[in-house]
Structure formats: C-alpha cells, structure tokens
Amino acid sequence: MADPAKVEIAGDGTGLNPVGQTSLGSRRLGNPKLAAGGALAASILLCAGCSPSSQAASPTGTPAATPSPPQLEALPPGVPAFFYSKAAGGPLLPVGWDGTRYAQVDLGALGASLPSGQAIQSPDGSKLLFGDTVYDRATASAVVLPFLDVNKGNRLMWADDNAHLCVMRDLGNYDQPSGTATELDLISPGGPTTVVAQVGRDVAQAFAMPRVCSIANDVAIVVQRAVAPISDVWMIKISTGAVLRHIAYPQGAQPGTVVASPDGRLIAAVGSTGSDILDAATGAALGRVQGEVIAFSGDGNLVVLADRIAAWRTGATTWRVPAGYRPIFVLAEPEGPGLAVDAEAAVPAPSTPGLEPPTSVVPQLWLVTPLTIVHIADGATPTFVTVN
C-alpha cells in the first residue's frame, strides 16, 4: 500500500494517536449453524477558532464556557456505511467508508418492539435484520420475515441489491437420522418469496449455507458443510434456479471451506496451507495465496487472510494483522476496496491442546482501505456477522 494515512481513533471517536501498521481478530456466536475508491481519509474533528484568547475569562471575571464537543451528524440517506454497537442490542453507531463517524441510529418507537440481539446489516447498511425482523432505515418501517427459524442460526445473507435475502429453508425435520433436504429461497421483505432451487441437506452438523447472493449478476453460490470441511459447491442462476456448476469434494478432503467474492465471479478454495483462487464459472485456476482466505474485497482485488490483507494477484501485503489477533467477520465496501474487519483473539495452534484464546485480548474493529487504516473501536459488536 503506497504510504497510506495510518491513524488510530479511539472507540469514542475523540482520541487520536499516530500508529504504524496494525491488525485484526475474531468472534463466534455459539450456534453451530452460525459462524457471513476515491481519496479516503480518517475523519478527524477539529475545533475551529480555538485560541488561547478565546479560552480566557470574560472582562467581568466570569470563566468562559468550555466548548462542547462537536455533535455528530446523522447518516445521510443513500450514503453506504457499516454499523457497530458497544454491546449486543445496544445503539447502532454508523461509520462511512471514508472513515466518517455519524450519530447513533435512532430506531424510534419501533426500537422497543424489535427483537433483541445482534443486528445484521445489508451491504450498504440501508436495512437491518433483527432476529426475523427487517428494519428499513429509509422508511423507519419493520417487516417480519416468513418461516425464518432464527433458533437454527442465520443461514441467510443479504443480496447485493440490499432489497432481498437468500435464505436456506429446511423442507423437513433436520433432527431425524437422515436429516432433511433444503431449498434456496429469495425473500423480498414485505413482498413475495421465490423458491430458487432445492439444494443441499441439513443433517447433524452438516448443512448448506449461502456464500453469494448477487442479483446484479443473477447468481447465488451455496456450499454444503460435511461437519467441518466443504463437500459441495453449487453455482445457481437465481432467475431460473438452474445449476450452472456443481463441484463435489471427497468427504474429509480439502478444502476446509470455500469463500466467494461478493459478485460471485471468484471463489477461494481454502486448504490447510494455502488458498486457490478460481474462476467460479469455469473452475480455472487464477492464482494461489499462502494462508486461509476469509473474505474478498468488494472489487475482488484483495483478500483478507488470517494474518494480513493482500492483493491476491501479486501477493503484496496491504495491511498486517496485529500479533495475537485474527480477523473473523468481514464486510466489504460495495464494489470497492474498503474492508471493515472484526478482529479477535487468535485461536491457539493445534499443537497446544487445551489452550484457549487469551481473555485479555479485547476484540478490535478496524476499517482498512488503500489510503486509510482506522481503529474504529475496542470490544465492539459489528453488524456484519457471517456464516462460516
């Protein structure tokens, strides 16, 4: 990365400290079915006109009033952003992809009626999913989704149009010995539900989950987990339900997981030592990176790895993850290079059985772009949890 601005901003947005390159971490939510351009600069609030004379006592001897901290503006309609809270269910704090912080989101009277817990945002942040309820920030309205069993984990993801969700729906009882077939549905909150295709199976710890839901490119990518590793990958044409491509892996073999770019054009088959970057449509090998790919950037040029962010074509590192941390949840700037990263304590290597991640390592939330690295907050709860 060519001399980016490196500014660490304290969690309350008021403390500024120059820092060098830094890194990331990880969070799991407990349910086995839940693991999902331009000149950018950190937003620094300056006090205009603050001089020693302006702080002096008045002629009558009355102390001058201490200036109030600048008030954050509301997030303007149509401006993409990501959100976090200081505790699950707490007020949502927006951050623009240029690093600008905005006033917390006021959910108004609807806030009290929304299900508690962690929100899941659409790619641009215009809609928020609370449990089985979608909140539309533009209209301040809420819609309950049909048949969504939130107790089984969120095997769903927002589409790139910010208006639909791809949802895996069980067609029977997954507790029976043979499990149940599943189908991919496209839900329009408050509108119709479309059955896209019957794909995958839900049984024990094996289940199907969406990796891509792209209305723009008319493609969904669904992967089947066989307890831990991936056993199948399907590329599906959303408009017709046709299976464009199916990859079957021997059970127990690599890859351990499969990650896809938001537009569905690239997939990373993640092995124990490296990740193969493939053309999703043809399966052609395009490159290989050392390490575990966790996510792609929105423009497909960068990958988030366990210890760094890198350009997969050249291998150039653009950001190094801090020691002791590992990125776990990532949100890509829509069609851009920016990455919001939730970083938590790195899990000890298998060679150290019985060890747990150090409890003293506080989760960190970062914004990483080609021009700016911003430490957003410590101990934050992001709104971009993903199925892993």
Image (spheres, rainbow, N blue to C red):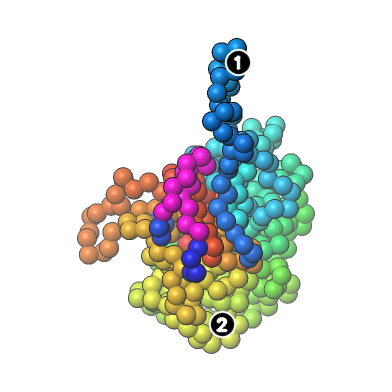
Q: Position of residue 69 (x, y in %)?
A: 58, 33
Report the residue marked by disc 2: 279
Place residue 19 in its image quadrant: bottom left
> Which segment is the magenta one?
5-19
Q: Does residue 127 appear in this view?
A: yes
Residue name at image x 35 percent, y 76 percent: 273
Residue 185 appears at what percent x and percent y?
Answer: 67, 63
Specify which label sits upstream in the sequence, 1 or 2. 1
- Tell me if mark 2 has few (under 14), some (14-19) or many (20+) residues whose alpha carbon lies within 10 angstroms of its own: some
Mark 1–mark 2 CB contact (< 8 Å)? no
In the image, residue 178 above or below residue 32: below
The image quarter in which residue 359 lies: top left
* Residue 134 place in picture, x, y as percent: 67, 47
- Horizontal placement of 205 versus 76: left or right? left
Q: Which of these two is toward me, 320 or 220?
A: 320
Q: In this image, 245 relative to 322: left or right?
A: right
Helix, strand or loop at mark 1: loop
Task: Mark yes or no: residue 157 visible.
Answer: no
Given residues 205 and 73, the one toward you in this image is: 73
Q: Amino acid at mark 2?
A: Asp
Q: Determine whether 5 is above or below 127 in the image.
A: below
Q: Which residue is mark 1?
A: 59
